[in-house]
Image: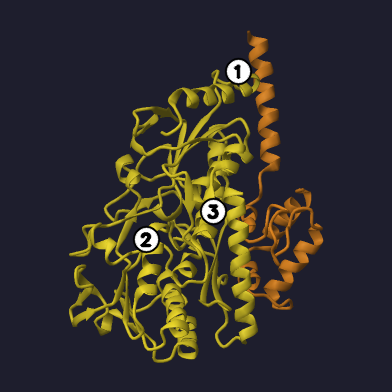
C-alpha cells in the first residue's frame, strides 16, 4: 500500500465513527466488504454496495493508481485514439466513502485479505474482481519476455502502446499476424475488432501490407457480420485462418517473430499473440478457481461455489452464457452488490436478470453489436432468456453501422462515468 | 438493556425496509450500462430516471413488437416480461 498504514487506519476510524449510531445496534461494527480489483467489475461493485446500503464499510483493493480500460483500446492500436482517453483514476470512487487501498492483495483466508505490506483487511463478505491473467505456460515460446517482442495487448496499457508502435514502425508491405485463442477468453469479439482496426490502419497508411488471423477456433463472436464487413472494407488485405484450416498456433519464436501451426510457419513483421488466459492470480490464491482456471459461482449471488462468503464477478467468473465483457462485468457487479447487501442483513437475495451489450468497431464509422439478457437457469447457470438477444442485422445500411459506431462511443462514456466518474 | 435492544431491532428493520424499497427490481440496475445514470454524460441514449412510467412501458412494448425502430433495444426488450417491464418502469419513474 502506498498510503501509510496509519493514514489508512485513520480513514477506517473516520468511516466507522460516522457509522456509529447505526453500527451500535449491530454487534458494534458496520458490515465490512472488501473488493479486490478496481476494473469495471470491482469499482462498479464497490460503488453499488455503498449505494445499496450506506452502512456498509467498503474497501477497494487495487494495485494501480490509474485504470486503463480495454474497451476501445483497439482504436488506440489502430491510431484512432490516444491511451489517455482510456485512463481513469479512483478519486471519484474514494469520494463515495470507499476506502481505496492502493496495494496488491497477496493472500486470502476465511476472514481477511492480506496486502503486500503485511496489512490485514478483515471482511464479512469478500468480492474478487481480478480480471484475467495470461497463462504463461500454455503456449510454448510465449513467456513474459516474448510479450515484449510479440505483444498480447490483452491487458491495456504499455502493451497497447507497444503494439501500436510496432505497427507504426513497420514498412509498407509487411505481414501482421494476430493469434486468437480458444474459448473462453476476455472479450470474445475483441480479436476480430482488433483485426478490423489494424486492417483500417494498414489500408489507410500501408496499403501493400497484409493481415492474417490465426485462430484456434472455427467460429467466433459476430462472425457473419465481421466477415461481411471485411469483404466490403478490406478485400484482399485481411485473411482469417480457422482451426480446421491450420489456424491453431502451437508455438512461437519471439526472436524471429515466427508463429508455428501444425500446417506450417508464419514469419510476421508484427505479431500480436492473444494467448490463453485464466482468472487473475488472487482467485487461485483464494481457492475460488477450479481446474479450468476460472471461478464457478452461484448465478443469483455470484458467491463462489468453492469458498463461502467470497463472491467472484467479471472476467474471472464462470458466468454461463454471459461473455467476459466490461458491460457484463458492470451488470454482474450491481447484481452482486444487491445480493451482498441483502445477505449482510440476513435477507434472501432475489433472482436477478442481467444484460450484456457489446459494440465492436469494424471501421471508425462502422459499428456492430451483440446484446443478451440473462437469468439463472434450473441447472444453476446464467442462461440467455429464450427469444432475446442477438447481433445487429445482416445487410443493414451503412447509416445503421454509423449509428452503432456512435452508440459504441456513447456507451464507453456512460459506463466509464458510472464506474469511475 | 432489553428495551434498548428492542428499539435497536426496530430501528434496524425500519432501515432494512427503506433499503429494500429503494432496491432496483430485476434487470433495472443493468440499464445504466448504456442509459446514463448521471446528467454529466452526453449520449443519444436517454436517461431513464424520472421518466414517466407509462412512457417507459410503451417504449419497451414497441421495441419488443418491432413497432419502434431500434439498434439493440429490440433484442433486449424481448428478454423481459410485461411484469418485469412494469416494475422497472415504476422504479425508474421514482428515481431522480
Counting every numbered tag in the picture gives 3
Query: A22 or B81: nearer the eye?
Result: A22
Identify the hue of chain B.
Answer: orange
Q: Tell me the subunit letter for badge 1.
A: A
Q: Mark 1, residues whose alpha carbon is within 10 Å: few (<14), some, or many (≥20)?
A: few
Does residue A402 show up?
yes
Residue plotted at (63% across, 58% down): A414
Q: Tell me the subunit letter for badge 3.
A: A
Discs 3/2, front:
2
Does B37 sit left or right of A98 as displayed? right
Q: Which residue is mark 3?
A: A330
Q: Is residue A312 above or below residue B32?
A: above
Which one is earlier in the sequence, the residue at label 3 or at label 1? 1
Question: Quick check: marks 3 and 2 in contact, CB under 8 Å?
Answer: no
Q: Position of residue B22 (x, y in %)?
A: 70, 42
Identify the hue of chain A.
Answer: yellow
Q: Position of residue A207 (x, y in %)?
A: 41, 87
Does residue A318 show up?
no
Q: Which residue is mark 2?
A: A159
Task: State the CA–CA distance, disc 3 to disc 1.
Answer: 33 Å
Q: Mark 3 vs mark 2: tell me if same chain.
A: yes
Q: Tell me the subunit letter for badge 2.
A: A
Query: A59 or A154: nearer the eye?
Result: A154
Residue plotted at (37% across, 60% down): A159
Question: Quick check: marks 3 and 1 in contact, CB under 8 Å?
Answer: no
Q: Position of residue A271 (x, y in %)?
A: 30, 72
Task: State the CA–CA distance, disc 2 to disc 1.
Answer: 49 Å
Amino acid at each position: 500500500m502506498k498510503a501509510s498504514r496509519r493514514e489508512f487506519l485513520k480513514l477506517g476510524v473516520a468511516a466507522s465513527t460516522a457509522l456509529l449510531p447505526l453500527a451500535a445496534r449491530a454487534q458494534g461494527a458496520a458490515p465490512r466488504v472488501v473488493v479486490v480489483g478496481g476494473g469495471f467489475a470491482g469499482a462498479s461493485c464497490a460503488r453499488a454496495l455503498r449505494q445499496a446500503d450506506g452502512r456498509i464499510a467498503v474497501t477497494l483493493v487495487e494495485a494501480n493508481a490509474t485504470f486503463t480500460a480495454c474497451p476501445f483500446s483497439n482504436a488506440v492500436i489502430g491510431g484512432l485514439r490516444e491511451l489517455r482517453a482510456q485512463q481513469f483514476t479512483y478519486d471519484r470512487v474514494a469520494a463515495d466513502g470507499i476506502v481505496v487501498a492502493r496495494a496488491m492483495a497477496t493472500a486470502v483466508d476465511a476472514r481477511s485479505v492480506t496486502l503486500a505490506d503485511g496489512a490485514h483487511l478483515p471482511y464479512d463478505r469478500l468480492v474478487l474482481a481480478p480480471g484475467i491473467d495470461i497463462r504463461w505456460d500454455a503456449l510454448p515460446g510465449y513467456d513474459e519476455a516474448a510479450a515484449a517482442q510479440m505483444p498480447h495487448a490483452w491487458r491495456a496499457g504499455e502493451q497497447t502502446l507497444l503494439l501500436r508502435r510496432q505497427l507504426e514502425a513497420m514498412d509498407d508491405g509487411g505481414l501482421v499476424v494476430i493469434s486468437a485463442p480458444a474459448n473462453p477468453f476476455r472479450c470474445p469479439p475483441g480479436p476480430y475488432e482488433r483485426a478490423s482496426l489494424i486492417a483500417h490502419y494498414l489500408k489507410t497508411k500501408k496499403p501493400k501490407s497484409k493481415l492474417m488471423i490465426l485462430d484456434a477456433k472455427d467460429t467466433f463472436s459476430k462472425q457473419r457480420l465481421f466477415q461481411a464487413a471485411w469483404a466490403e472494407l478490406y478485400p484482399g488485405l485481411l485473411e482469417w485462418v480457422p482451426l480446421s484450416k491450420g489456424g491453431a498456433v502451437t508455438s512461437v519464436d519471439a526472436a524471429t517473430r515466427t508463429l508455428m501451426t501444425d500446417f506450417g510457419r508464419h514469419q510476421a513483421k508484427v505479431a500480436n499473440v492473444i494467448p490463453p488466459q485464466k482468472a487473475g492470480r488472487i482467485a487461485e490464491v483464494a481457492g475460488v478457481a477450479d481446474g479450468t482456471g476460472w471461478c464457478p459461482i452461484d448465478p443469483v449471488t455470484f458467491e463462489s461455489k468453492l469458498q463461502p462468503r467470497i463472491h467472484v464477478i467479471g472476467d474471472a467468473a464462470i458466468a454461463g452464457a454471459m461473455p467476459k465483457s466490461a458491460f457484463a462485468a458492470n451488470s454482474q457487479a450491481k447484481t452482486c452488490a444487491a445480493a451482498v447487501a441483502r445477505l449482510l442483513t440476513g435477507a434472501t437475495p432475489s433472482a436477478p436478470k442481467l444484460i450484456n451489450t457489446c459494440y465492436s468497431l469494424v471501421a471508425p464509422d462502422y459499428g456492430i453489436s451483440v446484446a443478451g439478457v440473462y437469468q439463472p437457469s434450473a441447472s444453476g447457470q446464467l442462461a440467455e432468456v429464450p427469444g432475446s438477444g442477438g447481433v445487429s442485422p445482416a445487410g443493414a445500411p451503412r447509416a445503421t453501422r454509423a449509428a452503432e459506431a456512435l452508440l459504441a462511443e456513447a456507451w464507453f462514456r456512460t459506463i466509464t462515468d458510472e464506474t469511475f466518474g | 438493556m432489553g428495551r434498548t435492544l428492542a428499539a435497536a431491532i426496530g430501528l434496524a428493520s425500519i432501515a432494512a425496509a427503506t433499503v429494500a424499497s429503494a432496491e432496483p427490481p430485476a434487470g433495472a440496475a443493468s440499464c445504466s450500462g448504456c442509459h446514463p445514470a448521471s446528467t454529466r454524460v452526453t449520449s443519444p441514449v436517454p436517461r431513464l430516471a424520472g421518466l414517466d412510467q407509462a412512457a417507459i412501458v410503451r417504449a419497451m412494448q414497441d421495441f419488443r413488437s418491432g413497432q419502434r425502430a431500434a439498434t439493440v433495444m429490440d433484442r433486449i426488450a424481448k428478454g423481459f416480461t410485461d411484469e418485469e417491464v412494469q416494475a422497472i418502469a415504476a422504479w425508474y419513474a421514482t428515481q431522480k
